Amino acid sequence: MVSSAWSTVRGVVLAVLLAACSGDPQEERPDAGSVDAGSVDAGSGDAGLPPPDGGSTPGDAGTCEDDDPCTVESRDDAGLCVVTKAPDGTACDDGDVCTTQDQCVSGVCGGSPTTSAPQTFGTAWSHGASPAERSTAPLEGLAEFVSDDRLVFGDRLGGSGLSVSLVRVTEDGLQRVAQAALDIRVDRFFGATDWSDRMLTFFIPLGPDRVLVAGSRQRLELLGLEGDRLTSLARLPLHPSSNSILGGTGRGDHFWLCNGSFVTPYRIDPGNVLVADDTHNLQLPGTCNSLSLSPDGLTLWAGTSRGLVQVDVSRPEAPVVQPTLLPSLSLFQARSDGTYVVAHELLRYGQMGRILVYRQSDLTGTATPTPVKAFLPVEDTSRWERPVGFVFLQDSLLVEWVRLTGPMRAYVVERHALNASGVSSVVATLPLRESEEVGLTLSPFQLTGVGRHAVLQPWRRVVSLEGTDALRFRTGVHHGSFERVQAAADGSLLAVGPFGSHRVSVEDPQAPAVLSGGTALPADTQRLRLAPARPGVATRELVTLPALGANVHQEAGKAVLSCLRTGANGLLEPDGQVRIPNGPAVLASAKGQLFQAAPITGGGFTLRRFALDAACTGQELTPASEETVTVDPSSPETRKGSALAVDGTRSELLLGEMRYVSPDKPARIPLLWRSWSGEGGTATGELSGSTDQFTAMALAGGRGLVIENGREVYLLEREGTRINVRAHVNLAERASPVDVSRILAFDGVVAYLAISTVPSGVLALRAEDLSELGRYPTPAPVRSVTFAGPRLVLGMNEALTVAAPVCLGAAGPATYAASLRPGSTN
């Protein structure tokens, strides 16, 4: 049975999964002085390899503890560590949720097998989930204030639905008072010429008690917020071939939506009936990018590709379009606080524009006035910075920036005072993100705020004004991502996202409860992270989740990794940093070892292994071993992708390459299977595929699992120097076809795969023949799994679901195996 562990499955350490999906990183070149002999060990005979059971090596002068209840550690008279077996019958936990009555026998922990079928129970929801950081469009979800102290968050559920959370801002933080899931897709609009990232589903606040959900080509839905409840009041279908809605605003019984260069007015008739007023459509001089209302609700401001348009809507049934202002500017958005108008310039091809502040009384006639304040892009030898968003607050203007200084890329927000004389210099600065990685694609953002509170994109961190010259973050227990789940020592669950750290009770599987935490990790917490392999142990492992598919990539050069530990409050918290050199590469870890595979130009990989047993004090890790590994030494085809999987229990690795020529020719997939120390020989084989990338790869229990094209699944076994295909299935040819995006867990007996098609969920396969054992429906794509007591927990960006694992009892393997020949698929 399982008590506390990182995603461990069925008594075998969860296979470390790593595969290239978007092509190899830029390849490193071998040292000019090296000799490629196929395998060149840079260290001594064992090069610091851990013993097979993961315990301390006899003779090690360091720690003499291995966290294994089935071994006893002591030091002899010479001070050397001696490891002996614990007495048979010693109580232990074998890390297998499918066993009971665990005890030590001959130094090994084991239990009696049990059986159970797939079943899902309750779900805990988060709000304000953060984007997984990679070079892609940055937005992850929605947020809008409906009053000074209440806002609604919208989470995308992988794009297939919308989770709406009503949240109250209090002195103690964010308090979620209601949550509901809608069957409205959250489609993305990424500007083809300006590269701006926006959502085609968004909120329009109409007052403290109503908010409109606008879903392009789907429907408009009016939600009531009275009594801190979410109630559907009305729906209005939209034609499935209608134009994308890029902006909207409203108040009371009137709202406006824009698509292309047109603005359509709507009204809410008695009985909450939504009506489009097509007789008063407005024609704008350019493409509409944003709509906003003046504080008194009498003026509509439209930011367009050809200037700023002011519309008198004091009589909504008879709107009056005023002459265009700032006609030479293409605007991403524009807003007024009654005294000042702020216009955010939209440039082509990702060039972030200026943010200009005008006195509203100066915006008359056709002349362009001089702004009272301009926030300008800067680019010189020492710095690069761009303003990416703004929001009006009470007597203040917040401006969000992206700044590059040396290797550091930082997102920061700055506060400026607003008064009759103009816009002050910076009175407060708050960092949002600090990293040396390229990270998310740059885009302008439409920020939201009312009174003293604002939500800043793309991580949807909530900030509040403090006094006249300060800013501080606000958060709450449901705020942030639940994507990486881990069982805690006290039987609860830890859930972590890019900036979120939470503790969750799954004692009642039907109603998992978030106990503590929030979006509280500091701005310099890195994407690449090391944390204890399980609570209470010193050994660390790589716990970063791949941003896409099953890959953890290191960018070019040296990478910074954040170390995490369990704090006094039971939450994961920062514990220093380390660096690893020699990127770009792919990373994996097992048994307290970090593996780095860097492709070499011309073929092969440099495989480095780092020990993760030292304190994180900012040091650069030195490889315990380094070697050159060649998978397909004489191939004339270009390598398009690669994949690596590591089995810590058996000290083995599986390495694969994708050799792709053209769509009309099958891809070759050469594979290499060996011990990571190089002992015991090497097995090779080859598959064929239809794409130029792996979907995922795993290795555990003497079996390999390879997925290509999201649907071709291969179960591999090793026989001498050959790799055999034991089973193969095309998931698209099942009675209920699916595609999958990653291997969540694999122990050689059962594989849990994340379903990437709609509806979301997890597919459980019997490894022996790849037959389907069952499916777990989930509200969003699953990104991780773990066990908490007898429960399987499925971690998502926006939620976590408690389930029952698949347990097969004492079922044994079959005898069937097919020889794997070059180019074969079965």
Image (cartoon, grey):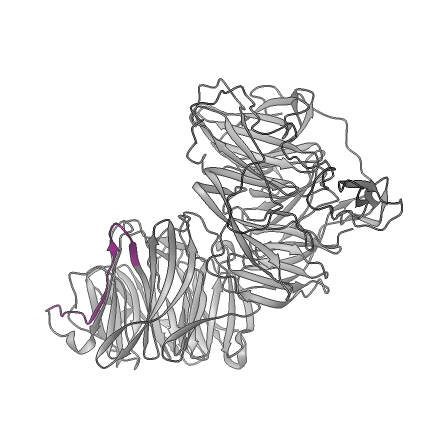
Q: Position of residue 255 (x, y in %)?
A: 34, 73
Indicate the position of residue 123 as horizontal and vertical percent values.
Answer: 63, 62
Q: Nearer the viewer, residue 730 or 475?
A: 475
Q: Where, by quadrant of the figure, is residue 466 drawn?
A: bottom left
Between 145 and 78, which is closer to the camera in this rendering?
78
In this view of the protein, can residue 418 be seen by the observer? Answer: yes
In this picture, which residue range is highlighted in magenta?
367-386
Q: Main secondary structure of the magenta part?
A: loop
Q: Position of residue 264 (x, y in %)?
A: 30, 67
Residue 546, percent from left and from top: 53, 46
Q: Is residue 378 magenta?
A: yes
Residue 281 in sight here: no
From this view, report whether residue 238 is shown above or below residue 226. above
Quarter of the image with the C terminus is top right
Q: Residue furthest top?
A: 634
Q: Is residue 732 above or below residue 630?
A: below
